[in-house]
Image (cartoon, helix red, strand yellow):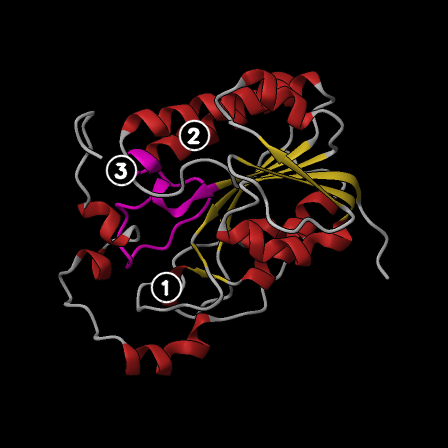
């Protein structure tokens, strides 16, 4: 059995669908896993430590981070939403996380950024790590802020962070856009292990996608990381073709990497 890499891994957003999918897959990575969310985490195993935490509460975040030597940050708002909740969870909450990490030994962080930081690039474009950010909404802007914050903490304090621009992290791709953006749970789990295993990480941009034939993103700069995704959305093409109508060529979901996020309105304070 593989020896655990970490003593205590913190997973924020652990009650969400992705957190639930990763818990068992990541069990061998750490002796103890601290599962944090705004809502209670179901059925913790003996090696798991459930913690209820509001990311906007600096004192609670400090206590959540204390004693952890690795952080998988999945927490916060994960869809387009009004600015106020995004501000609290994704901007103030991330600042609180990085300040807590700075106070508690700078544990390595994997920051779940998003493809929506580049959502207005077209699906005909192939992007490397240094492309211009083109967020498709307030959610994407908050993730762009998160990447900038992480980079500043690295340059100023040496805080290592993997900036993983996650595509569509689901059990399987379910529509034609996902043929380009899909990230399997198994490939994400091996990426997480690589991030916390590699001797020197720095603050790299990593495209969070499987080895999709129709992929849009270039991870050729990551040979040093030792991560090679194994899954390919193409395996599901026939199933998707049979179950989903092909979108019109000029539909946002067929044109832009961010899909329908590029069409969402900006929510005002009066909207929910």
Mark 1 and mark 2: Cα distance apart in space? 24 Å
Query: What range is drawn magenta here?
Result: 113-139
- Magenta stretch prevailing secondary structure: loop
Mark 1 and mark 3: Cα distance apart in space? 19 Å
**Circle 3 SS class:** loop
**Residue 263, x across and y down, in percent:** 18, 47
- Residue 145, located in which quarter of the rendered image? top left
Mark 1 Cα-neighbour bin, 10 Å: few <14, some 14–19, many ≥20: many
Vertical order, 148 against 70 (above or below): above
Vertical order, 247 against 252 (above or below): below
Residue bearing mark 2: 90
Instruction: Specify whether 144 is left or right of 101.
Output: left
In depth, the one of 8 and 44 nearer the eye is: 44
**Circle 1 SS class:** helix
Mark 3 Cα-neighbour bin, 10 Å: few <14, some 14–19, many ≥20: many
Mark 2 Cα-neighbour bin, 10 Å: few <14, some 14–19, many ≥20: many
Do the residues under discs 3 and 2 have CB atoms within 8 angstroms?
Answer: no
Residue bearing mark 1: 178
Name the residue: 29% across, 58% down.
123
Instruction: Specify whether 130 is left or right of 266.
Output: right
């Amino acid at each position: 059995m593989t020896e655990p890499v970490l003593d205590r891994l913190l997973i924020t957003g652990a009650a969400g669908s992705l957190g639930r999918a990763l818990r068992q897959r990541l069990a061998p990575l750490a002796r103890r896993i601290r599962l944090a969310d705004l809502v209670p985490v179901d059925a913790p195993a003996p090696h798991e430590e459930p913690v209820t935490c509001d990311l906007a509460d600096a004192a609670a975040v400090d206590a959540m981070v204390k004693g952890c030597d690795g952080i998988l940050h999945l927490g916060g708002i994960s869809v387009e939403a009004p600015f106020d909740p995004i501000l609290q969870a994704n901007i103030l909450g991330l600042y609180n996380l990085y300040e807590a990490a700075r106070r508690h030994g700078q544990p390595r962080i994997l920051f779940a950024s998003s493809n929506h930081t580049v959502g207005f690039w077209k699906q005909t474009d192939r992007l490397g790590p240094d492309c211009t950010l083109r967020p498709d909404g307030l959610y994407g802007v908050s993730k762009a802020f998160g990447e900038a914050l992480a980079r500043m903490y690295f340059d100023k304090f040496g805080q290592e962070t993997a900036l993983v621009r996650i595509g569509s992290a689901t059990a399987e791709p379910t529509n034609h856009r996902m043929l380009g953006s899909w990230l399997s749970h198994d490939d994400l789990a091996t990426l997480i292990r690589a991030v916390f295993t590699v001797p020197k990480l720095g603050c790299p941009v990593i495209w969070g996608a499987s080895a999709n034939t129709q992929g849009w993103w270039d991870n050729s700069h990551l040979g040093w990381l030792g991560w090679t995704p194994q899954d390919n959305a193409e395996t599901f093409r026939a199933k998707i073709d049979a179950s989903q109508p092909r979108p019109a060529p000029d539909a946002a979901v067929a044109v832009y990497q961010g899909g329908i996020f590029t069409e969402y309105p900006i929510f005002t304070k009066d909207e929910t």
